[in-house]
Image (cartoon, grey):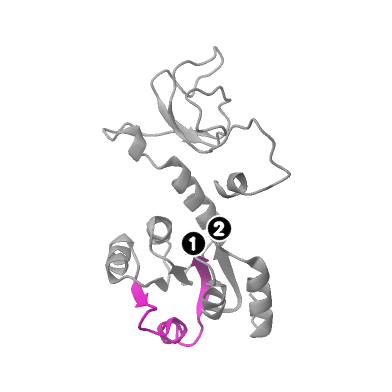
Amino acid sequence: NKYPYVSYNPEITYPRGVGHEPVCVVEDVGSAVKKFAVGDLVTGHISRAFATHLITGTQGLVKIPDTNKRKEFCLGEPLSCISNIVRAAQPEYGDNIAVIGCGVMGLLAISALSGKALQNLIAIDLDDTRLQEAKLYGATATINSSNQDAEAVIYELTNGELADIVINCVNIENTEMASILSCKDDGTVYFFSMATSFTKAALGAEGVGKDV
């Protein structure tokens, strides 16, 4: 969340604790705490995550299962975001879903959606290596949009229906229309990107007559 801090934002005051959803080791607990114990590895909705020590309640905390991994490799914050994406999307049996962008967040989204009995789970990227990874994570089809017409391929894969849900995980500008054109009327587009212009998305959808 660096963007508000590197530009002028009158709503942000200083000093200010920054960061959220860290992975932490429990160092002490109150007498009423029963779910957690000293030494547990936890994550969850915790603010001021860049601090060395935090005092917080138990609401929203999740214990990470025992693991030999270093805590730096336990991805609390990204997986919290992916959980929110899947819960918001609420895919139904037989849906067609397209994920645009196969970086870390896109691949995690594909992995989380791969067990949802979808008709198609389509990965879109410019990099063939990432698209190969997407197949390992559960994508049923891949599109390299540098040399393929993504909308046309999705149209063919879905028998002319296009995607029920499009999830944009591309953190570069001007990908709004690619998402909208890949989605069917009455479908849903989720922009999981700090580069999204919702004005462009709204005007673009209106301009092509898409009700998404």
Q: Position of residue 100 (x, y in %)?
A: 45, 69
Question: Residue 194 lies in what quarter of the image?
Answer: bottom right
Quote the CA–CA distance across marks 1 and 2: 6 Å
The label shown at residue 123 is none
Residue at the limit of the structure toward the right, as seen here = 10
Badge 1 element? loop
Badge 2 element? loop
Q: Are circles 1 and 2 on residues that touch, CB within 8 Å?
A: yes
Q: Position of residue 115 (x, y in %)?
A: 39, 60
Residue positioned 54% across, 14% down in the render: 30
Going from the N terminus, do you reach mark 1 or mark 2 first?
1
Q: Position of residue 97 (x, y in %)?
A: 47, 70
Residue positioned 40% across, 83% down in the render: 157
Q: Which amino acid type corresponds to the residue marked 1 in the rendered image?
A: Asn
Residue positioned 73% across, 44% down in the render: 10
Q: Is residue 122 magenta?
A: no
Q: Which residue is mark 2?
A: 194
Q: Which amino acid type corresponds to the residue marked 2 in the rendered image?
A: Met
* Along the line of sight, the residue nearer the viewer: 80 or 52: 52
* Along the line of sight, the residue nearer the viewer: 81 or 31: 81
Q: Which residue is mark 1?
A: 171
The part of the chain drawn in magenta is: 140-168
Q: Residues within 10 Å of mark 1 (few under 14, many from 20)?
A: some
Relative height, residue 89 to residue 187 (above, below): above
Q: Position of residue 125 (x, y in %)?
A: 38, 71
Question: Residue 88 lies in what quarter of the image?
Answer: bottom right
